[in-house]
Image (cartoon, rainbow, N blue to C red):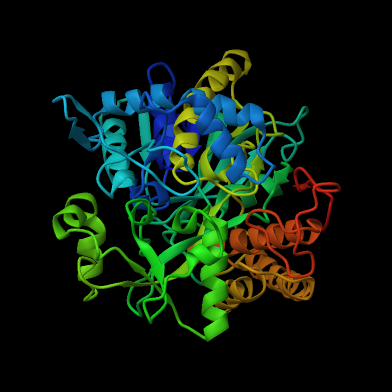
Amino acid sequence: MNEDQTYDVLIVGSGAAGLSLALALAADQRVAVLSKGPLSETATYYAQGGVSAVMDHADSIDSHIEDTLTAGAGLCHRDAVEFIVRHGRERIEWLIAQGVPFSTRTSRSGVVEFHLTREGGHSHRRVVHAADATGRAIEETLVERVREHPNIALLESHMAIDLVTTAKLGIAPDRCVGAYVFDLDARQVRTLGARTVVLATGGAGKAYLYTSNPDVATGDGIAMAWRAGCAIANMEFVQFHPTCLYHPHAKTLLLTEALRGEGGTLVLGSGERFMPRYDSRAELAPRDIVARAIDHEMKRFGLDCVYLDISHKPRDFILEHFPNAHAQCLAYGIDITRDPIPVVPAAHYLCGGIVTDLDGRTTLPGLFAIGEAACTGLHGANRMASNSLLECLVMADACAHAVRAVLAANAATPAIPAWDESQVTDADEEVVVSHNWDELRRLMWDYVGIVRTTKRLERARRRIELLRAEISEFYGNFRVSGDLIELRNLVQVAELIIRSAMKRRESRGLHYTLDYPLTDDAKYCRDTILRAGDFS
């Protein structure tokens, strides 16, 4: 194995979690960061709202903890919630030190302080933001820092195919020692050895027909971890963001929750407001409640969309607080200072993922997972707004300490055989991939969406099994491509979502089924955990 293909730490993913971890480790470790496209093409970049943390004297850690537990519908792990919330402020201060330009305001006494906004589920203003493009500000700052660092190798346009474990090499005990990686530019597979591997690959929104996620969100880390034998939890809890722009040419434009936090209302085409009929918190109810309310109104009246209206606020206020949303909507002919915005729910955030502890350790030694790909127990049955970037930052820091401990104890990486392409040929019909991709996303939207039934889930499971068999056969006979790798991962993640949903026989948080419409506090399942061998 060439020296440039061996690292102390291989980080798969370049969002806030992956880049924060790389910066935390690079002072004395040889780190590689893998990115499917440009470093900044991540879900972090498109996050608008902000980072939740207790920054105001009128707020408290206990209040943030209780709000998170309430939003999580009884399934949050309290130890995870307390740990992550208590470390929020220090992570904000770390971002400030990196140069992230958070929005400020001048108080009545003349003191410059952070402008804090409030989002759904929060009882106080505690969301630190950079106007309405917080993720972009964080991502661009961290990208600049990692590009400056001599100990960080940046492998852009590289896509992980599968993890390499010692079990696969016939060596005991089992641990993760690297990955096979597809170089998208050279169109060849590389072998990367690593003493530790960290999956920071984000979510799987592209499993659904409509999503706020960028194209890279194909569940790669979760699928690879499952194939390597890791436990996966709570995949039924897919958060649908209530307000994505409904427009034939808008692909994934999310309208920040802060619009509702600052007074935006949800209305029908007639102008009638409907959220107060569903929840006393109205537009500030948790996302699962708002998304289901919109879904119900659309189905009740046969609507294509509903409307988010903030035009009653002063024009200057809107332009100051939401310049990004204003500019993006204006590009589609919608002036949010005057017009209601047509919106629909879309798949947004995955609350489940690879089971980890509070250091990011998975059930496979040598493998860590952080960010949206991981399931720490923070979110429970529903993520509270702006807790996602908080989790990325806190868990990256915690993971850095744990990785150092593993590196201190681990020996060198064993030799890994090169990728074997001797039994495959070039694909003769790419239409198989594109057709299966479209069918997968549509069946997930129709049968495993905001409102579910046992019959729909059974139908989805049967079709997914056929799709997985077709894709597996295609994968086994032809050389890999970027689309094929992603499709293979998506169909695996889709099956995990379906099987998790079938195991939860109640409605709770983001999982709502007409066959079990009530929350069952007597016989509920704390975590829906899937392990190797549960199904073939």
Give the left or right position of residue 429, taking residue 260 as reference.
Answer: right
Q: State which quarter of the image contains the C terminus.
A: bottom right
Can residue 360 be seen here? The reply is no
Q: Residue furthest top?
A: 408
Give the left or right position of residue 451, taking residue 192 as reference.
Answer: right
Residue name at image x 44 percent, y 29 percent: 21
Q: How many marks?
A: 0
Give the left or right position of residue 79, taking residue 312 as reference.
Answer: right
The location of residue 372, given as percent across then percent down, is 53, 45
Residue name at image x 59 percent, y 31 percent: 81
Q: Residue furthest bottom?
A: 302
Rendered view: 71 above or below 448: above
The location of residue 360, given as percent across then percent down, is 59, 30
Residue name at image x 39 percent, y 52 percent: 157
Give the left or right position of residue 386, taking residue 134 as reference.
Answer: right
Can residue 290 be seen here? The reply is yes
The location of residue 512, given as percent across then percent down, is 68, 63
Rendered view: 24 above or below 472: above
Rendered view: 535 above or below 376: below
Q: Nearer the viewer, residue 382 or 176?
A: 382
Rendered view: 167 above or below 222: above
Quadrant position of residue 393: top left
The location of residue 380, given as percent across then percent down, is 64, 43
Residue name at image x 19 percent, y 35 percent: 105
Q: Nearer the viewer, residue 353 or 477?
A: 353
Quadrant position of residue 219: bottom right
